[in-house]
Amino acid sequence: MALAPLPRWPMPVITSHGDYASDSEKSLENYIGGPLYAHQSALPTLPVPPLAKTLSTLNKSAKSLAANDREYAAFFAALKSFTETKSAQQLHSRLLSLQETSSNSRTSWLQKWWNTLGYLHVRDPIPINVSYFFQFKDDPSAPDCVTRGAAALIATAIFRNQTCSGELPCEEIGRKNKTKLCSTAYKYMFNACRIPGKKSDTYNIYDPSRNHHVVVVRKGLFFVFDFVDPVTNTLKPINTIESLLNRCKNIADSNITPPNFSHRIGILTSNNRTQWAEDRERLIRENPQAAPHFRRLRAALFCFVSMTTPPSLTSVPLRSFGTEEKTTRTTAFLTSRSRSSAARMGSAGCWESTR
């Protein structure tokens, strides 16, 4: 199957520190173009609500969370007292000033705070605290997890091509008078990875036209193969992809795995972010030849996890993290021998991680 050609980026990788409005990240939308980003410059910026509305909304939210009437009454009294102070107006004025600054006038005044203070700076482990997942209905037409996985890879490759070429239609809401939605998040969906840092993480997005491979994980072993021809930009046939997945599965399930292979490297990524950053630095420092392999993992289209037990509401967010995969990828697709499947995602400017 021939896919639409992908524009070659001016640079092979862009490192994001959490600011959508940075020149390097914003310029990608104009460079990729297409229907997906055609309306970006015309989108309205995020407004700062009037102070009275903000406090009213806060009051309603707090009321639903209060343990009892006494707790809510104490909160309401404190809120009423705060409303009458100069501090309330001063804080609101600061938000208005922030909205008017040159760096925020083109985008959301909240986005950088959200992406840094509420995301990249947070030191909690990604599993459970950040990543979310979808569990799909079983497909009775798929005889096994390999066929189900191959079908998922092909469907994902087609969607990824529409996204990375900009040919995907822009999302809209409304029935009659439709409103265009921001497409910024799509840049971070494929060929992307969150990188651990000691104080703050970063986020790498790689040129899709230079990276056509997928990472396959089974029993703590990592495999990489191209499933889009880098020269012709054609999708490999499903029987070829099934053969490649079967090969990965057979190697992982064979007896050649060392008997003491109990400490899987993937489990390190389920630690808190500062500890994982230190562990990662040590891994590369003591084993420099591993650096290009780390890069290969980071730049993959996405991560495919072949699980030995079915993904479920408990196993996907809990058990599978770290034991069967590395968990800092943007998008991961999981299947099991029972043909059950799920997808896990996250965000670091938009989407987050599972690698």
Image (spheres, rainbow, N blue to C red):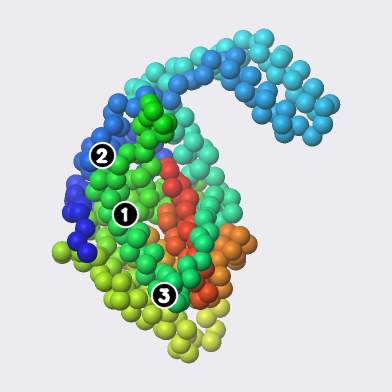
Within 10 angstroms of label 3, few (less than 14), some, or many (20 or more) residues?
A: many
Q: Which mark is residue 146?
A: 3
The residue positioned 48% from the left and 33% from the top of the image is 113
Q: Position of residue 2 (x, y in %)?
A: 19, 61
Q: Position of residue 271 (x, y in %)?
A: 56, 59
- Lower position in the chain sequence, tag 3 or tag 1: 3
Asked whether the beta carbons under mark 2 and mark 1 sit within 8 Å of each other, the answer is no
Quadrant of image for the N terminus: bottom left
- Lower position in the chain sequence, tag 2 or tag 3: 2
Judged from this view, the residue extending furthest toward the right is: 70
- Say what amino acid the circle numbered 2 marks: Pro
Q: Which mark is residue 160?
A: 1
Nearer to the camera, 290 or 18: 18
Considering the numbered disc 2 on the image, is that residue within a helix, a strand or a loop? Answer: loop
The residue positioned 48% from the left and 50% from the top of the image is 346
The residue positioned 72% from the left and 28% from the top of the image is 63
- Say what amino acid the circle numbered 3 marks: Val
Q: CA distance from mark 2 to mark 1?
A: 15 Å
Considering the numbered disc 1 on the image, is that residue within a helix, a strand or a loop? Answer: helix
- Residue on which disc 2 sits: 35
Question: In the displayed structure, would residue 285 be above or below residue 128?
Answer: below
Residue 203 appears left or right of 1: right
Q: Position of residue 161 (x, y in %)?
A: 27, 54
- Say what amino acid the circle numbered 1 marks: Arg
Nearer to the camera, 216 or 140: 140
Q: Quadrant of residue 190?
A: bottom left
Question: In the displayed structure, would residue 133 be above or below residue 307?
Answer: above
Q: CA distance from mark 2 to mark 3?
A: 34 Å
Quadrant of image for the C terminus: bottom left
Nearer to the camera, 95 or 142: 142
Considering the numbered disc 3 on the image, is that residue within a helix, a strand or a loop? Answer: helix
Residue 13 shows up from this direction: no
